[in-house]
Image (cartoon, rainbow, N blue to C red):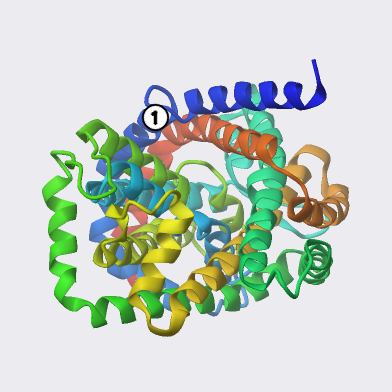
């Protein structure tokens, strides 16, 4: 068998395996059931305490000198959002609409609401069970709350998560993101930039940030994430304001087809209710990462007095990622009417065409390009933290710097290489991370319920 044929066969096998893990019988129902259970157990905290979460975020820009950690609560949240807000907020939303129709957006929203309770539990447990390494790093996440919360007999599952996390960080968090940066930049500047020069530039830029460790990453993401999110949201709001007459119809199409499916119209082939739910839920979960176990690794670094405080910030991850950023993408696509066009053949084309059709002077294409580039680059920064902390769990403090160096050197590979197999492996290992994490969340949920009740029963914690 030729090497190319072997690669294609292996990629097809991994794709099939990944499709099973992410399919309607394994990960999607497990993520949803755990999210619903936690939402009910926490007495619908995602709705009842949302305003309090934003107050905690505002105060979390600073920290008390007596509290322990590495990053301010706000920067820990921004590091988490750096990895969470990515190409899925644009391309993933477009995929959901292209394949599921407008009603898929409704199911993305529902997924985010229950995902907020999941993220609350993840961040709370990450701080409660975190450890301090000999070098003074605050490390936490699923591997630590499995080991310290569930006991020695579960350490195999913690190790499994850490292994999956390291592998996923090089795929979904590095090479695929670098490839997305290259594709977007070269699409608009390919006549003045070569892939090799772009790979070198991205290597230097990434190295200047990552080699400085989690504190430098936190400092950069604390500025980059708000900037890129505000830029994208302002651009989207401009479109919605200037096309306000079409906004009510966009909302109507979301709600009217959410429980019925959507008939064929224009270039859209139509979708059943099952298709709509599947693509809405899958893209929502892929975008906000609730339950996958990645973001609690960032939240574990927070300088915070009480674990529940950081849990409230973790809860904002899916809200800001899906309810805000993804909704902007969805509404612009629906308002533009491009999703029914017969000329649309890919999700990336749909998003760019929708923004370009509704903004003057070709600015829409540039907004999508810049946003996709920043989203992908920020994901590289956030996932470096995730992969490094998984490596520290497996090999100790001494693994931190070598991991960062290797992670940085892999970035140009993502720019220059063909990544069909890497994409397939990334999806698979990203999904596999969720299974040990969800088991741990279920088993440790009584701990979170008790801590949360005690926290809100104490008036001092509400100040």
**Front-most of 185 and 115?**
185
Left or right side of 34 for 103: left
Left or right side of 132 for 151: left
The quarter of the displayed image where residue 10 is located: top right
Residue 385 visible in this rendered orientation of the protein: no
Q: Examine the rendered structure and indicate whether residue 283 appears above or below residue 411.
A: above
Q: Quadrant of the N terminus?
A: top right
Number of numbered discs overlaid on the protein picture: 1
Q: Position of residue 420 (x, y in %)?
A: 66, 38
The quarter of the displayed image where residue 250 is located: bottom left
Farthest-out residue, front: 343
The quarter of the displayed image where residue 205 is located: bottom right
Residue at x 20% of width, y 47% of height: 265
User: Pointer 1: residues within 10 angstroms few (<14), some, or many (20+)?
Assistant: some
Left or right side of 181 for 91: left
Q: Which residue is mark 1?
A: 30
Residue at x 50% of width, y 60% of height: 85
Residue at x 39% of width, y 75% of height: 233
Residue at x 29% of width, y 42% of height: 100
Q: Examine the rendered structure and indicate whether residue 239 appears above or below residue 395.
A: below
Left or right side of 349 for 214: right
Q: Position of residue 109 (x, y in %)?
A: 28, 52
Q: Quadrant of the C terminus?
A: bottom left
Q: Position of residue 68 (x, y in %)?
A: 63, 66
**Front-most of 43 and 399?**
399
Residue 444 visible in this rendered orientation of the protein: yes
Q: Position of residue 122 (x, y in %)?
A: 48, 47
Local secondary structure at mark 1: helix
């Amino acid at each position: 068998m030729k090497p190319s044929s072997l690669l294609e066969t292996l990629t097809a096998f991994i794709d099939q395996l990944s499709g099973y893990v992410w399919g309607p019988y394994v990960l999607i129902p497990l993520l949803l059931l755990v999210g619903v259970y936690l939402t009910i157990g926490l007495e619908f905290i995602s709705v009842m305490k949302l305003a309090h979460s934003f107050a905690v975020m505002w105060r979390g820009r600073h920290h008390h000198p007596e509290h322990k950690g590495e990053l301010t609560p706000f920067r820990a949240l921004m590091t988490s959002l750096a990895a969470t807000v990515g190409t899925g907020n644009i391309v993933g939303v477009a995929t959901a609409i292209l394949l599921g129709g407008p009603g898929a957006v409704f199911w993305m929203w529902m997924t985010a609401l229950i995902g907020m309770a999941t993220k609350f539990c993840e961040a709370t447990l990450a701080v409660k069970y975190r450890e301090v390494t000999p070098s003074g790093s605050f490390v936490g996440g699923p591997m630590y709350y499995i080991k310290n919360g569930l006991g020695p007999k579960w350490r195999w599952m913690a190790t499994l998560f850490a292994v999956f996390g390291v592998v996923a960080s090089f795929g979904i968090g590095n090479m695929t993101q670098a490839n997305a940066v290259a594709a977007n930049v070269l699409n608009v500047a390919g006549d003045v930039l070569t892939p090799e020069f772009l790979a070198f530039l991205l290597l230097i830029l990434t190295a200047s940030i990552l080699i400085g460790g989690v504190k430098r990453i936190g400092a950069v993401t604390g500025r980059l994430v708000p900037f890129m999110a505000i830029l994208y949201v302002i651009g989207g709001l401009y479109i919605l304001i200037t096309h306000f007459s079409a906004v009510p119809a966009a909302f109507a199409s979301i709600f009217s087809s959410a429980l019925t499916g959507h008939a064929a119209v224009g270039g859209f082939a139509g979708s059943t209710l099952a298709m709509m739910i599947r693509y809405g839920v899958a893209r929502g979960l892929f975008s906000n990462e609730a339950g996958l176990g990645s973001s609690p690794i960032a939240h574990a670094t927070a300088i915070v007095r009480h674990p529940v405080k950081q849990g409230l910030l973790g809860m904002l991850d899916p809200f800001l990622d899906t309810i805000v950023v993804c909704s902007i993408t969805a509404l612009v696509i629906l308002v533009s009417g491009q999703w029914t066009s017969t000329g649309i053949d890919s999700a990336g084309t749909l998003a760019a065409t929708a923004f370009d059709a509704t903004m003057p002077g070709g600015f829409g294409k540039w907004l999508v390009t810049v946003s996709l580039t920043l989203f992908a680059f920020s994901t590289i920064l956030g996932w470096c933290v995730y992969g490094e902390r998984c490596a520290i769990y497996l090999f100790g403090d001494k693994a931190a710097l070598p991991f960062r160096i290797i992670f940085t050197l892999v970035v140009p590979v993502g720019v220059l290489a063909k990544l069909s197999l890497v994409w397939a492996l990334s999806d698979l290992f990203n999904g596999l991370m969720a299974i040990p994490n969800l088991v741990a969340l279920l088993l440790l949920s009584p701990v979170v319920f008790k801590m949360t009740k005690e926290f809100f029963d104490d008036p001092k914690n509400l100040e």
